[in-house]
Image (cartoon, coloured by chain):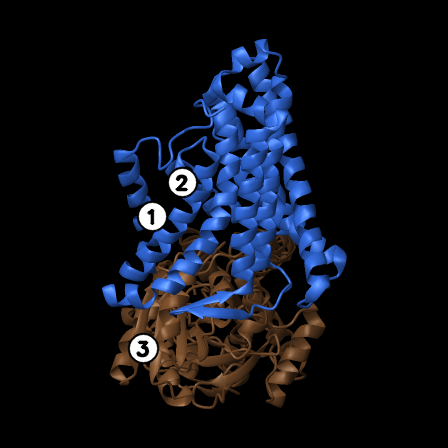
Amino acid sequence: MWNDFTQQFWSSTIDGLTNGAIYGLVAMGYTLVYGVLRLINFAHSEVFMIGTFAALGALTLLGVDSPQSGLALVGVLLLMALIAMAVSGGTAVVLERVAYRPLRKRGASRLAALISAIGASFFMQEVFAIWKGRDQVSFPRVMNKDVLFNIGSGQVRNDKVLVIVAAILMMLALDRFVNTTRLGRGIRATAQDPDTAVLMGVNIDRVVMTTFLIGGILAGLAAALYGVFFEITQYNVGFLLGIKAFTAAVLGGIGNIRGALIGGLVLGLIENYGASIFGTQWLDVVAFSVLVLVLMFRPTGILGENLQRARV
Amino acid sequence: MRRAYSRGLVAAAAASALLLSACGGGNDSGSSSGSGGSSSGGTLSIGFMGAQTGPNAQLGINISNGVELALEQHNAKSGVKQVKLIKYDTQGDPTQATNQAKKAVTDKVVAIVGPAFSGESKTADPIFEEAGIPNVSPSATNAQLAKNGWKFWHRVLANDDVQGPGAADFLAKTVGAKTVAVIDDQSDYGKGLADAVRKQLATDGVKVAVNDSINPDASSFAPTVNKVKPANVDAVYFGGYYSAAGKLVKQLRDGGVQGTFMSGDGTLDAQFITGGGAATNGALLTCTCSSAVGSTDPAVQKFAADYKAKYNVDPATYSAEGFDATNIFLQAIDAGKTSPSDINDFVTKIDYKGVSKQIKFDPNGELAGNLLFVTEVKNGKLAFLGDTSQAKPSA
């Protein structure tokens, strides 16, 4: 048991960080929307799912059917990510318009919005199940998976580095955006006190739309990275990943942007360490037990809910 | 085999099955009105029992296509007794099967191809047993069925207990594996199969270096890969279905795991190759069902070509078994046996070279020889290698 853990420590760490980076990117979408609207956007997993299909569509459009290298690879990856981000961002904005805004305008309870979210989630899943079929769909291999170097038992592969680096860069960019720009200030103000924010001249519809757009863009990037890394998607690909990402958001402190990424990375690591010690069948049990333990001692998560607390 | 078919496929299958069963209904009423004549005069009726509609209809249609082809070829020969087919659509439902079995008894069919599934065999066979109607199942694999002491029941494929140990023996003897990782998907089917493999590998003196269970819906199987990699195994056995198997084999190969990948009939599907891509090359898949596609035997090739000409698709899972089961009865009828009990006596002693395998029955109705068949993925295609005694994997 402990032997397995020490033997597989480095490989588990690397895989944990890679999976965790994808969880973290999706978690940021949950956390942003929660921070602003106090709404758990359960349809966010479908925003991610649609992003994977958009990434696949981009590859088909570009006619990529073999691994690329050099500049061609950079171009393909960028285009694929941009298309996925655009489609996911657009989906999130439409989702807000259709499923949430009408409810918000009529002052419906948060519970009604939650049900609307679940309904939208089922709707999008079934549309894709009927359109794309219920079996999994494969991505062509975009990049050769080369081992760059080894740390102990762990192989550091180029695609894993890409996922981790892209996620961290995106998190930094988002953090700058929210903390330094005018729109970012609007987001923080709305998160703190929506009524006062409106009185101060913040256009709340615009803030909410931007929040959904950013969440969607991040999910789109996660989807493109997922496509490059796992090379597979399916109409229900968002379900399990969405639950994990939501868990990561809560673990890090829901409403907290840095917390989402940290929650994602921690969750990824715990899962992989737990699986190496107890066997893979215990992966989810270990991950969720840790979540419960963390919340027992720190109910607001690792970093606390501080999008709405004054950090202005 | 217990597998959930994708709903899209099923919808298409159900639509075509509706058409088929509509025709079957016509035959039905025709035969019962003329049944007084048929028992004494020119034609005999045999029945097919299995799903033609419902969620698992595709398997039933694969079989009934084989049955119809056999009858068409038989009736086209000159100087033979004409044999008519009556289809009993059970929708794969054991309750429906009881009603349909009673109907078959009143229709005075002389033999039944089916029941197709294990559940419906359990409810329909006591009725056939009492009425004394011989039946040969082309696809029911539950091991318990042979333990009822039924005299009129037979099946043309080995049961579920054969697959796990057969696969383990194949890994130990033919592949020559010394250390193996056994992984399952925690389902009844996958875990049952993997446990049977684990047990038999231990008996064969092969070291099971890694035991692991995955969640088939997860994206990442990294923890499993990280366990298998340092163990340097000669082979990886996976008990589960094709969608998880495709993801797993790809992540194993990307993670640098060498060695043969092997799995069971739940993975025997083109979707496995779609999901796993190039990583599936060299993978070995077992099934107690035979495959007519890619065989080098001229008789089998002729069957595959005739089937394709008639239905415009390749013979699929259990088509060859349906064809063989029908031909066993036709042999009996051609030998002048026309009463159910005479046909049963003939079938019980038969030694017949079918397109799926050599068919001979044990006294309990099981196929003699416990054959298990191996298919290898070669260049992105499923290539049939034959039974475990003759299969030669390329790697």
Q: The blue chain is which one?
A: A
Tell me the chain of label 2. Answer: A
Name the residue type under label 3.
Asn
Q: Name the residue under label 1.
A: A287
Question: Mark 1, residues whose alpha carbon is within 10 Å: few (<14), some, or many (≥20)?
Answer: many
Residue B156 % position (x, y):
44, 77
Residue pointed to by mark 3:
B364
* Cα gap from disc 2 to disc 1, whole angstroms: 9 Å
Report the side of B68 relative to B227 (left or right).
right
In the image, what residue type sits under mark 2?
Answer: Thr
Above/below status of A235 relative to A141: above
Q: Is B348 in front, or is B252?
A: B252
Pointer 2 with pointer 1, Cβ within 8 A:
yes
Could you classify mark 2 by the number of other residues whose Cα lies within 10 Å: few (under 14), some (14-19), or many (20 or more)? many
Task: Give residue B171's quadrant in the image.
Answer: bottom left
Across and down, in percent, residue B284 comes to 48, 78
Residue carrying label 2 = A247
